[in-house]
């Protein structure tokens, strides 16, 4: 599993990390705000983290079922839920490594440490939320990452709309409340506390448990996963 992860998503993540590090170390930011340069580079780290999560989890279940690999993987009495949970956890480790690489590049550019527990904690929360969403979607469709990306963009649109007074009606608020709280996670944001942290944790855990439940109780050959 480690070998497959390294040769597949790991290689793509390494390319993304290298490109992000190149951008960070090669370009200057002109701003009158003393913290403006750091803010811009945090946007780059945040965007790279989202890409890392999507790469690490895309097709995590659906790729095996689409190719028919599940017939060999589970020919022996092995738990599909535990198998894919292990794969999901390893994907989280790969995402953390990618974020550390980009964070080191930002640290070198700004001459200030960027790798700290807060950055890694926010990376973990984003992986729990977005990675959990892709995980559960992958038990239904091979377009898991694409649907998840649409949800992220749609959530961002609702957030922007509410900030300027649009999408603030009952329907908009209902959709916003039902979607994962992506506005609370990511390297650009402080670690949520209290109700925010509880919301992220419960929502992400529910997504992962939902994926495991589908793998545990749904027949492996059911559904086209198309």
Image (cartoon, grey):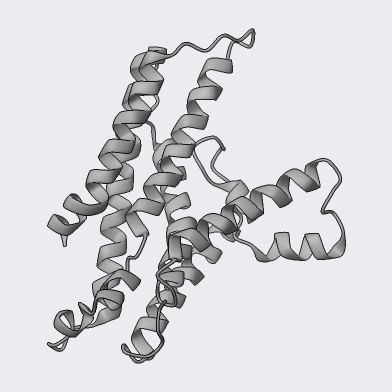
Task: Name the foreground residue: 87 vs 205.
Answer: 87
Q: Residue 225: where, in percent of width, then height? A: 40, 79
Q: Is residue 211 above or below residue 14?
A: below
Task: Name the foreground residue: 71 vs 195.
Answer: 71
Q: Residue 143: where, in percent of width, then height? A: 44, 66
Quadrant assignment, res 34: top right
Quarter of the image with the C terminus in it: bottom left
Residue shown at 42%/38% (left/top)?
A: 48
Q: Is residue 92 left or right of residue 171?
A: left
Residue shown at 55%/23% (left/top)?
A: 39
Task: Name the foreground residue: 53 vs 205.
Answer: 53
Task: Name the foreground residue: 68 vs 115.
Answer: 68
Q: Tag count in the figure? A: 0
Q: Is residue 68 left or right of residue 61?
A: left
Does residue 193 show up? no
Quadrant assignment, res 74: bottom left
Quarter of the image with the N terminus in it: bottom left
Q: Residue 220: where, in percent of width, then height? A: 31, 88
Q: Residue 33: where, in percent of width, then height? A: 63, 11
Q: Is residue 138 left or right of residue 76?
A: right
Residue shown at 44%/65% (left/top)?
A: 144
Residue shown at 30%/76% (left/top)?
A: 66
Q: Is residue 121 above or below residue 148?
A: above
Does residue 207 show up? yes
């Amino acid at each position: 599993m480690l070998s497959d992860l390294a040769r597949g998503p790991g290689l793509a993540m390494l390319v993304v990390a290298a490109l992000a590090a190149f951008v960070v170390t090669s370009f200057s930011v002109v701003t009158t705000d003393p913290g403006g340069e750091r803010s811009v580079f945090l946007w780059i780290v945040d965007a790279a983290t989202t890409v890392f999560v999507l790469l690490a989890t895309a097709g995590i279940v659906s790729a095996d079922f689409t190719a028919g690999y599940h017939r060999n993987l589970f020919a022996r009495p092995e738990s599909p839920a535990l198998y894919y949970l292990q794969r999901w956890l390893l994907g989280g480790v790969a995402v953390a490594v990618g974020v550390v690489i980009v964070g080191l590049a930002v640290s070198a550019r700004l001459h200030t440490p960027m790798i700290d527990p807060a950055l890694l904690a926010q990376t973990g929360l984003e992986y729990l939320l977005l990675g959990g969403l892709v995980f559960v979607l992958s038990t239904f469709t091979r377009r898991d990452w694409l649907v998840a990306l649409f949800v992220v963009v749609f959530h961002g649109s609702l957030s922007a709309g509410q900030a300027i007074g649009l999408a603030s009606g009952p329907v908009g608020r209902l959709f916003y409340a039902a979607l994962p709280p992506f506005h609370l996670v990511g390297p650009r944001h402080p670690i949520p506390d209290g109700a925010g942290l509880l919301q992220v944790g419960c929502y992400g855990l529910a997504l992962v448990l939902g994926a495991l439940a589908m793998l545990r109780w749904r027949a492996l050959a059911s559904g086209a996963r198309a």
